[in-house]
Amino acid sequence: MGDETTKPTKAPYLLIAPSWAALGILFLLPLLVMFIISFGMRGTYGGLKPIDDLWAYILSGDFLANYKRSLEPLYWPIYWRSFWMATVTTVLCLLISYPIAYYIAIVAPARWKNLLLALVVIPFWTSFLIRTYAWMLILRTEGLINTVLMEGGLIDKPLDLLYNEFAVMIGLVYGELPFMILPLYASLEKLDLTLLEASSDLGAKHVSTFWRVTLPLTMPGVVAGVVLVFIPSIGQFVVSDLLGGAKSMLVGNLIQNQFAVARHRPFGSAIAFELTAVVLLLLFAYAWWAKKRGQEAML
Amino acid sequence: MSVSVDIAGVTKRFGDFVAVDRVSLQIRKGEFFSLLGPSGCGKTTLLRMIGGFEFPTEGVIRIGDRDVTWLPPYKRPVNMVFQSSALFPHLTVIENVAFGLRYKGLNNGAAKQKARDALALVRLEGFEDRPPAQLSGGQRQRVALARALAMEPEVLLLDEPLAALDQKLRKEVQLELKNLQKSLGLTFVFVTHDQEEALTMSDRIAVMNQGRVEQLDASHHVFEYPKTEFVAQFMGAPNFFTGVVKSLAEGLLYIGGRTEADIRARTTSDTWRPNDPVRFVVRPEKLDLRTKSGTSDGEVSIEVTIEDRVYQGVNTVWVVRGDDGERYMIYEQNDRPFQESSRFRVGGRAFMSWNPRDTVVLEKKS
Amino acid sequence: MLTPEPATRAASAPESVETTPAFVGPRAPAPRGAAPFPWERRLLGIHSALVYLFLYAPIAILIVFSFNAARQTARWEGFTVQWYARLMENTLILKALKNSLIVAGVTTVVATIIGTLAALALARYSFRGKGATQATLFLPIIIPEIVFGAALVTFFGAIQLRLSIWTVILSHIAFSISYVAIVVRARLAGFDRSLEEAAMDLGAGPVQTFFRVTLPVILPGVIAGALLVFTISIDDYVVSSFVAGVGATTLPLQIYSMIKVGVTPEVNAVSSLLLLATVVMIVVSQRLQQEPGKGESRR
Ligand SMILES: Nc1ncnc2c1ncn2[C@@H]1O[C@H](COP(=O)(O)OP(=O)(O)OP(=O)(O)O)[C@@H](O)[C@H]1O
Ligand SMILES: [Mg+2]
């Protein structure tokens, strides 16, 4: 290893050049273009309106119009909903995931572990769209639940289970759950079980062992899971589009709308950047937290 | 004897850190040569420079008559047995052994045959088609050895190839390796931090410390006549005496200051001058504990205080302290059944004596 | 993502799975203090069973419904494979499948090569811009997909590149490189460098060493990365929905538009098939990602 690090060589640049080109042209450049466009004005056909006098445009402050508009009270409910739904999703995922992660990592018989873990990993990679769609089958008016309840004579009019915030919530928790279980599992697996014994030995009850030893030691997994669930939840639009109604619109839907329906790309770009800023802020906070704890980040 | 590997003034720096410090030595054709030293002393780095995996910061390395200092590994007539064995996991045993033969221009059939011969040499017939993952640690190392031997190298380099083996297997393989080396007449350069292992196998040993070669001698010589405190310590002789040179005559040094009569000790150096301070050692198994000062036969005797007695199975170790404050170890062979009581008592006084010919004078400090 | 060895939302999990002993060997049974009482263990077990039910019931229901003869309701009206048979006649779906296979195929080949080269550079060398490269590699995965899609469509618009199947492929390559780089790099981290030294010692030059030793040894990682990328590409809806041109409808896009029109048994059937294909690829890829030798039995 010493040699590569001390001898200057062209090899790494040849190896990395294609990635630089691809990411530069297809990732960084598009972000930059979108950033610039977020300061522009919409033209007639949803295109960009040409700006004659750039200097005057900047001085007039019009270039901030999209950002100003994005902060209008009209949109507040959408932001607020995105925030609280992401928060509740995260909390629910955490509460549901910790016990199962604990079970797989510590309690389950060794020979089952591979299988139990694989069963968590599989949904992780399967189509989010299809998994969301499956809930439509269950929740819709002619869906499984309503059919069963009606056949059983428990209700005589189908319940409105789909196209509301409740359905979106279920979809979000369902979709994000594996992203919480896996980091929790990873940190519980690393936990030195003799510490738990030591705690018991020193007189702690199991509950206080959990609060005083287990939880603090698995905090990296908890925080990683929170970040991993919160970020995609707040940028979500498929779940709310399929399972939610007009009243459960999220930021993601707002952005998507500007591109697909309203054809107002500059405005859509502005909101997309605000969302990105929030996400990056979260990541920075996470990196800072991990560094402060002197631990390697799990992300 | 002709020189196989010539290392001339080699230094290797990693940044500011000097891993190998101005080493010059010559390895002879057909000898079993060991690099011995504690962890981090630069043995591996030196070996890797011979193999071509690192390049010296300064100095020249020759193999045969050829300057190979800057040749890549695949152009050198040497082969290496790695500590981790480094068997290719995606190839079978025989494919591993035949791996390099294609670069020697052998066709597939000839390569396989040669590989089989090499495997026979390390007594691994019948394992040809196994993947390395299905071998034991000892078998893996033997495949690695066969793989290197099949290349018919001028010099075989071995970096602690036995470190991962358990004690018993290790002893076995040591002897096997030594016999193989003798019968093939190959030059082996062997790296180890285990002095017993080095003594068992080597013709000559270079003891390294902090990147430098402290002593290079025939293996029994290194053991019996350490030249520096470090080598003495490393070879298990931590009994240091200080005296003053009285005179030097015909290879005999007269040392005073410790006993009434001067101690006579052999020396090869003629740089000693009267009144020079001199350090010498006596190996613990060459020391005796006596109740009386036995000055017969010119034996040297020093009165000491007994501090501890440790039973170690083969030996009993007496830890004593001289009146100068130095601590000494004395091995008493347990040739009789062990008994709790002894003529010597911890805390009591006794005499430590040795035959003057066992006095080993350390090199003069410059 | 700002730390040297970050993983990411999608990539972190398989990695952490890989490094945990659960996939490679059992751990000693839980000691006292971990969950000492049988009722505690049982409670955790029941909770876990319920979570698995929650994760898999919707998928199971989807698959069962794909064999249900009923067209509109959730009532069971007999077993049938007619919906699968109908897929074969649905030219829209077949066209979409073809598009998806082309996109995923090209993406996989290109991204695997570029990503593997990047992984080699990152694992083996230190070079200028390494830290920035690592951080940038993680961004496409961590940034909300919707932002990624929006940025790309804005960019393609700005450079007046007509949306087509090629814009889809370019976009997929952009986010896939990161996944390959991460998976292959994880594999390279466990690579014993002395293998390469041994090859050179035995006379193989640098190029021969790469093709005879390095590549075969990391090949499982490369294939695993390729399979993951293939799955992600073939499942992708969000980014594709932004950048797909006319006639470039991929399978998820097709499914989505069918869902929006209404739940139909054909959607169930095609979704089930897509799920099955994904699961097969995940299982294979997980197998391949396990440490070499550890999975094999010792005789
Ligand atoms: N590539 C490198 N970069 C920086 N320092 C190195 C490198 N290789 C070795 N060193 C340092 O050089 C010194 C000598 O290392 P070397 O591997 O030669 O020791 P060694 O005598 O073989 O020890 P051991 O018995 O532990 O294997 C060590 O302090 C080591 O940390
Ligand atoms: Mg070493």
Image (cartoon, coloured by chain):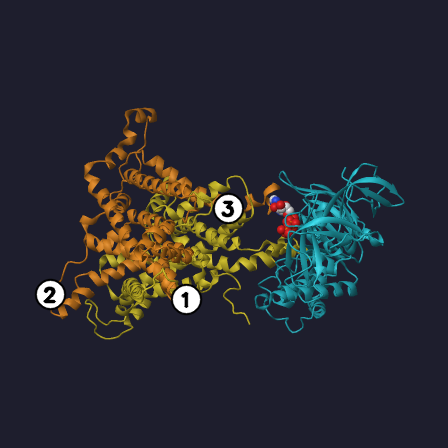
Classify mark 1: residues with Cα within 10 Å, few (<14), some (14-19) or many (20+): some
State how far apart marks 3 and 2 are (Cα): 62 Å
State how far apart marks 1 and 2 are (Cα): 45 Å
> Helix, strand or loop at disc 3?
helix
Report the amino acid beneath label 2.
Ile
Report the amino acid beneath label 1.
Ala
Q: From the viewer's perspective, is residue B336 above or below residue C126?
A: below
Residue linked to disc 3 = A18
Report the amino acid beneath label 3.
Pro
Q: Chain of mark 1?
A: A
Q: From the viewer's perspective, is residue A274 above or below residue A88?
A: above
State how far apart marks 3 and 1 are (Cα): 44 Å
Q: Are marks 1 and 2 on the same chain?
A: yes
- Looking at marks 3 and 2 on the same chain, the residue that comes earlier in the sequence is marked by 3
Q: Are marks 1 and 2 in contact (CB under 8 Å)?
A: no
Q: Are marks 3 and 1 in contact (CB under 8 Å)?
A: no
Image hue for chain C: yellow
Image hue for chain A: orange
- Looking at marks 3 and 1 on the same chain, the residue that comes earlier in the sequence is marked by 3
Q: Nearer the viewer, residue B33 or B254?
A: B254
Q: From the viewer's perspective, is residue B6 above or below residue C28?
A: above
| Residue B115 shows in the view | yes
Classify mark 3: residues with Cα within 10 Å, few (<14), some (14-19) or many (20+): some
Q: Residue at x 31, y 67 (%)?
A: C38
Q: Residue at x 13, y 67 (%)?
A: A150
> Helix, strand or loop at disc 2?
loop
